[in-house]
Structures are given as structure tokens and as C-alpha cells.
């Protein structure tokens, strides 16, 4: 128990002192996962809209693949992205392996199916016929899509939260494609793993608290948006 | 006076999964008329409605609005801003009543001031004046459907399509909605197409009636004409001509047709009004409300068709009863609850059934199967 209390005390000290290294790691985590989530919203929602509004052969297969993708292990994504970005790999010419861009790419691959899968479920859950009703009121295709998204805003925000939660907390892919390089690709999760393995529990605790607080604040913000729009 | 044709369908076909689900060779919608599409579930009413509204692409044929062929996406989108549709479910957005009614106006980019005044007008007209700020989630079924109607009429549509608009509200609410819709349609002179499986709804709202079966229009004509003069056994049954018997014309003179019902229909004689070629096979239809029941033969009655029969079945039908009789042939009659108890009608009871020659409707469509 002493170990824990000592860890908590030191963690608090580090936080209050605004340790520059801790600050840098935190900001990088937020930036990388934030960008990855934003890009996933564009890609994932786009995919969800395409699948929800169109009938095509193999639609069920696509939905099944999306749902499977929601549970894809980050280490598998890490391995795949590493191979792709490897110097002689198909995307090797980009030269982004072991940079924050590589982490963003890996997290994009993780979050997109989550947002697409949950987003698709949200759109398919709307009242049947709503699309035709909106069109019959004179909507253009773009106006119709916008109204459907707005109508499904509560579950769609939940999808975004799930996507962000998935990438801010994942460690396997970030360590594999980022390399946990100090000052460059070290994020909260990879730093926590490293400090724990070194026995620096105080630092590891401090990083974990920040991670928790971060995940909580972002989700609290989104929940606030979600519930505010829910009660008018 | 011939009115302008608003919507014109020619050889309209819709396929679903490789199967043809709709085929309409000719259909014209005239300005100011209300056309009812009637038929059982699955007859293709909704499919035809959606196809006419340009919301369901047709696989063959053509559709013209005021003479313009609706072929390109641009034409269809322009058409969508001049018509609108009310569905069986109100399909409101998760917003206030006012925001819902304003939706179509907003999509058209109408300025807020005009939008608000039009929304208030139509909300008031449909009895929603007090509910403008209420969330659509907290409306009763009737209020929600009123909101959907206001959302449609506020657009001043050139054509209003209604797909079984009152099927999911209770009877009392439906009465009020039907009254209001009838008045508004009459006052505004809005051209409308309404799909319904309810003859009462069609009778109260429509000028013309199209009866559909298996993706085709079986009969199209004026409301009274179709209900009183069905040209097809299916239409006859559907519009409530419950007695349909096979017969053959024996003679036709002085405006009276004498018919012999086929042996399996009792081998009796029935008299109808009109002219027909002797020897011809026909279907003899009698509406149950045109059959009178009594206990004794009434010599003062002008009814030419009088038969002795026995009650086989008594079926309650809301305010009245349907009585099925065996007169050597099947005959159905409607009586009030009062007549029922006065006549002591119950299975096995012997009664006299009578109907006038004018109440006998003959279906003599070409190609009627003699073996029918």
C-alpha cells in the first residue's frame, strides 16, 4: 500500500510542478489522438452514410466487415502499419515510420471502423421512411444527409466518443509505429508502459492520472453536447 | 371544362429485385382533383404513389409534370419542391412543432419572417396554435399527424401525395383529421393523390377512384361510378358488393333484363334494369345495403326480386349487422340492431329477402369466363 500512496504523492507533485516533459507528452497524446479522431469522423461517417443510403450487392458483407473492424486488436494494426511504412514497404517512400504521423495513421485505422460501425447503426436506427419524407419536403441530397445526421446526433456523438476513447487509450500500435522516442513520439500510454517497466511507479501513476483526466474531460464535453441537444 | 393535366404517367413500370411490381399504362392527374388509390395491402398503392412523386425511380415509361419530362435528377429535384407527401407515420424530426412545420420552407431558403407567419397560420388552421413550442416527441398520434399535414400544406404544394395518412390513429382522431383534410383540400383546391384501403376515406375525400390489384389499376373512374358500377369481380368485392352470382341473360325487353342464376347458384330468376344480349354470361352483383328483409311477403313493395330464404350467419359490423342468407343462392344483407331484434334474426330463421331491379348490377366485361 505504501508504494501506491508514495506514487500518488509524487504524481501530484509532478502534476502541480507542470513538469515540461509530462506536459509535452500530454499535449502530443491529445494532438495525435485528436487529429486521428477527426480524420476518422470524416472517413467513418462518410462510409456510414454511403452504406446506409445505398443498396448494393454485398452490403451485408461490408457491414459485417465494419463490425469486425470495430474489435480489431491495436497490435495487429500496429504490425500492419509498420510493414506498410517500412523503408521498402508500399508506403515506405513517405518516410513517416517512427514519427507522430505514423501514430496518427495507425490510430486512424483503429478508430475509423468504430465510428463507421456505430455511425451506421445510428443511421439505420432512424425511422424508416424518414429519408423519403425529407426528400418529399424538397431537400437536395446534401440537405437530406445533413438532416439525417442531425437527427441521429445523439448516437453519432456516442460513436465519436467511442472512437476517441479507443485511440487515446491504445498502446500497442503507438509503440510499434511510433517507437516511444523521447521528445518525438512518446505519448501517455507508451510512456506509462516504459516507466512501469523501469519501476518508476510515481511517474507512471502521474501519467495514468493525466490519461484518465483527459479521457474524462473530452468525453464529458461530448456528453454535455449530446445531452444538451437531447433536451430541448 | 377540361382542366389542365398536372401529372401524366405513360407505361410506368417499377421493378424490384428483377420482379415487376407496378405497371400503369395510362394515368393522368388533373388540376384540382383528388384521386384515391384503393386496394388491399400489397396491391401497389404506395409504390404507385412513390413513383408518381418521383421518389421511387421507374424502370420504364415516362412521367411528365406540367408537360415536362421528369427524367434528369435536376428535373426530379425541381419537381420535389413543387409537391410534397404525407406518410402513414408522421415522420417528424426531433425538434419543436414549429421547427417541424417550417422544415420544407427552410429547405427552400424562405426568409424567417415569411416562414414564421406561414407556420403560425397553418398551425392555427390545424389546431396546433398552442403546441408550436412543444417537442415533437411529446405529441399524441393525432397531433403528430396534424403537424405532418401542416408541414405539407404550408408549402402550398401543387400536388399533395398522401400514403394511408390516417391508418395509425384511432377512429375518433381519424374522424377529426378527415374532416379537416376534406375542408382544406376543398378550400385550397389542392390537387391530391391519396392511397387508402378504406372506402369511407376515399368516399369522403376523392373525386376519382382507382382500384388496384397486384401492381395494376383494375378500374379507374368517378367515385360513384366505380362504387356503383364495378367492371370487374375483384373491384365489386372490394367496394362492398358482397353478393356476386353467376348467371345468364334469358331475355331483355322494355328495359328489363331477366336473368337465370346458374344451377350451382340456385337456378332462380333475377330481374335487372337495362339491356343485354340473351344467352350472355354475366356476374350479378347486389350490395348488402340494398337488400330488405321482412317476415312476410309485402305486396305493396315495388321490389321485383323477392326470395324466401333462411338466415345462415349473423355477423356484427359496428353499428349494424351483416346477415348471410341461403335463398337457394348466397345473399348478404345489412340490417340495424333494431331490425335485427324485431325480426328475431338468428341462424335458421326463415325470412323474405327483396331487392329492386335497379339494385342489381351486372358485370359483363368482355372475356368473362363462361365457366366462372
Image (cartoon, coloured by chain):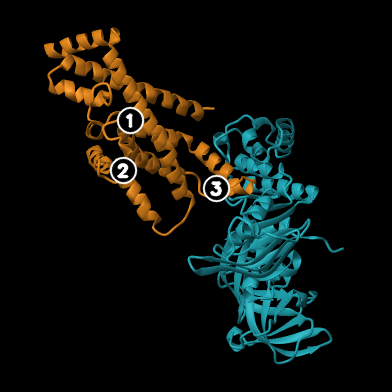
Chain colours: A orange, B cyan
Residue B194 against residue B136 in the figure, above or below: below
Pointer 3 chain:
A
Pointer 1 chain:
A
Secondary-structure class at tag 2: loop
Residue B130 against residue B73 in the figure, above or below: above
Task: Name the spot of residue B191 as percent of width and height, x first.
Answer: 74, 54
- Which mark lies nearer to you, 2 or 3? 2
Q: Are marks 3 and 1 on the same chain?
A: yes
Point 71% across, 44% down: residue: B153
Can you tell which quarter of the image residue B325 is in?
Answer: bottom right
- Residue sitting at the far right: B1
Badge 3: residue crowd in 10 Å (few <14, some 14–19, many ≥20): some
Q: Are marks 1 and 2 on the same chain?
A: yes
Dot placed on the residue nearer the N-terminal end, 2 or 3: 2
Secondary-structure class at tag 3: helix
Residue bearing mark 1: A165
Per the rendering, the mark at residue A91 is 2
Mark 1–mark 2 contact, CB under 8 Å? no
Secondary-structure class at tag 1: helix
Task: Name the spot of residue B127 as percent of width and height, x first.
Answer: 70, 37
Q: Nearer the viewer, residue B42 or A197?
A: A197
- Determine the CA span between mark 2 and mark 3: 40 Å
- Which mark lies nearer to you, 1 or 2? 2
Per the rendering, the mark at residue A131 is 3
Dot placed on the residue nearer the N-terminal end, 3 or 1: 3
Point 60% across, 55% down: residue: B55
- Residue sitting at the far bottom: B279
Q: Nearer the viewer, residue A29 or A131?
A: A29
- Determine the CA span between mark 3 and mark 1: 31 Å
Amino acid at each position: 500500500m505504501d508504494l501506491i500512496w508514495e506514487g500518488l504523492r509524487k504524481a501530484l507533485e509532478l502534476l502541480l510542478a507542470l513538469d515540461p516533459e509530462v506536459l509535452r507528452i500530454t499535449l502530443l497524446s491529445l494532438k495525435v489522438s485528436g487529429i486521428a479522431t477527426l480524420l476518422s469522423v470524416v472517413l467513418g461517417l462518410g462510409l456510414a452514410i454511403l452504406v446506409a443510403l445505398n443498396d448494393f450487392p454485398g452490403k451485408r458483407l461490408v457491414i459485417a466487415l465494419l463490425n469486425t473492424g470495430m474489435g480489431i486488436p491495436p497490435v495487429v494494426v500496429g504490425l500492419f502499419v509498420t510493414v506498410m511504412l517500412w523503408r521498402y514497404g508500399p508506403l515506405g517512400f513517405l518516410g513517416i515510420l517512427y514519427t507522430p504521423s505514423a501514430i496518427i495513421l495507425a490510430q486512424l485505422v483503429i478508430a475509423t471502423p468504430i465510428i463507421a460501425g456505430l455511425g451506421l447503426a445510428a443511421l439505420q436506427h432512424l425511422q424508416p421512411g424518414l429519408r423519403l419524407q425529407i426528400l418529399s419536403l424538397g431537400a437536395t441530397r446534401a440537405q437530406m444527409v445533413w438532416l439525417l445526421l442531425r437527427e441521429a446526433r445523439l448516437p453519432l456523438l456516442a460513436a465519436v466518443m467511442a472512437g476517441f476513447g479507443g485511440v487515446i487509450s491504445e498502446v500497442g500500435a503507438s509503440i510499434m509505429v511510433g517507437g516511444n522516442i523521447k521528445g518525438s513520439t512518446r505519448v501517455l500510454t507508451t510512456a506509462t508502459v516504459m516507466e512501469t517497466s523501469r519501476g518508476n511507479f510515481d511517474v507512471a501513476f502521474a501519467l495514468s492520472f493525466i490519461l484518465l483526466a483527459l479521457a474524462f474531460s473530452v468525453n464529458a464535453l461530448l456528453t454535455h453536447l449530446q445531452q444538451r441537444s437531447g433536451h430541448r | 371544362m377540361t382542366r389542365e393535366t398536372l401529372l401524366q404517367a405513360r407505361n410506368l413500370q417499377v421493378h424490384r429485385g428483377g420482379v415487376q411490381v407496378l405497371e400503369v399504362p395510362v394515368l393522368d392527374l388533373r388540376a384540382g382533383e383528388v384521386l384515391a388509390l384503393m386496394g388491399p395491402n400489397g396491391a401497389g398503392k404506395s409504390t404507385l404513389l412513390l413513383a408518381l412523386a418521383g421518389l421511387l425511380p421507374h424502370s420504364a415509361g415516362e412521367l411528365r409534370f406540367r408537360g415536362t419530362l421528369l427524367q434528369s435528377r435536376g428535373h426530379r429535384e425541381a419537381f420535389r419542391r413543387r409537391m410534397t407527401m404525407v406518410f402513414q407515420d408522421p415522420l417528424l424530426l426531433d425538434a419543436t412543432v414549429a421547427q417541424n412545420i417550417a422544415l420544407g420552407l427552410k429547405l427552400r431558403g424562405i426568409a424567417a419572417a415569411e416562414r414564421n407567419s406561414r407556420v403560425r397560420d397553418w398551425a392555427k388552421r390545424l389546431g396546433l396554435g398552442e403546441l408550436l413550442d412543444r417537442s415533437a416527441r411529446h405529441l399524441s398520434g393525432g397531433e403528430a399527424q396534424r403537424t405532418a399535414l401542416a408541414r405539407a400544406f404550408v408549402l402550398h404544394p401543387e400536388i399533395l401525395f398522401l400514403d394511408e395518412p390516417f391508418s395509425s390513429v384511432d377512429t375518433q382522431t381519424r374522424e377529426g383529421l378527415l374532416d379537416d383534410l376534406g375542408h382544406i383540400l376543398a378550400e385550397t383546391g389542392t390537387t391530391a393523390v391519396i392511397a387508402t384501403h378504406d372506402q369511407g376515406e376515399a368516399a369522403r375525400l376523392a373525386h376519382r377512384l382507382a382500384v388496384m390489384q397486384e401492381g395494376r389499376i383494375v378500374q379507374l373512374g368517378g367515385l360513384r361510378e366505380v362504387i356503383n358500377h364495378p367492371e370487374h369481380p375483384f373491384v365489386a368485392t372490394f367496394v362492398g358488393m358482397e353478393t356476386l352470382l353467376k348467371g345468364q341473360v334469358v331475355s331483355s325487353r322494355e328495359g328489363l333484363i331477366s336473368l337465370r342464376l346458374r344451377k350451382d347458384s340456385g337456378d332462380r330468376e333475377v330481374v335487372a334494369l337495362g339491356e343485354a344480349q340473351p344467352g350472355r354470361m354475366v356476374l350479378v352483383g347486389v350490395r348488402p345495403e340494398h337488400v330488405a328483409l321482412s317476415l312476410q311477403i309485402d305486396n305493396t313493395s315495388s321490389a321485383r326480386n323477392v326470395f324466401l330464404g333462411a338466415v345462415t350467419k349473423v355477423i356484427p359490423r359496428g353499428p349494424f349487422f351483416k346477415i348471410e342468407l341461403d335463398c337457394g343462392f348466397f345473399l348478404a344483407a345489412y340490417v340495424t340492431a333494431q331490425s335485427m331484434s324485431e325480426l328475431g334474426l338468428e341462424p335458421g330463421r326463415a325470412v323474405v329477402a327483396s331487392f329492386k331491379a335497379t339494385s342489381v348490377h351486372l358485370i359483363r366485361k368482355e372475356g368473362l369466363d363462361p365457366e366462372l
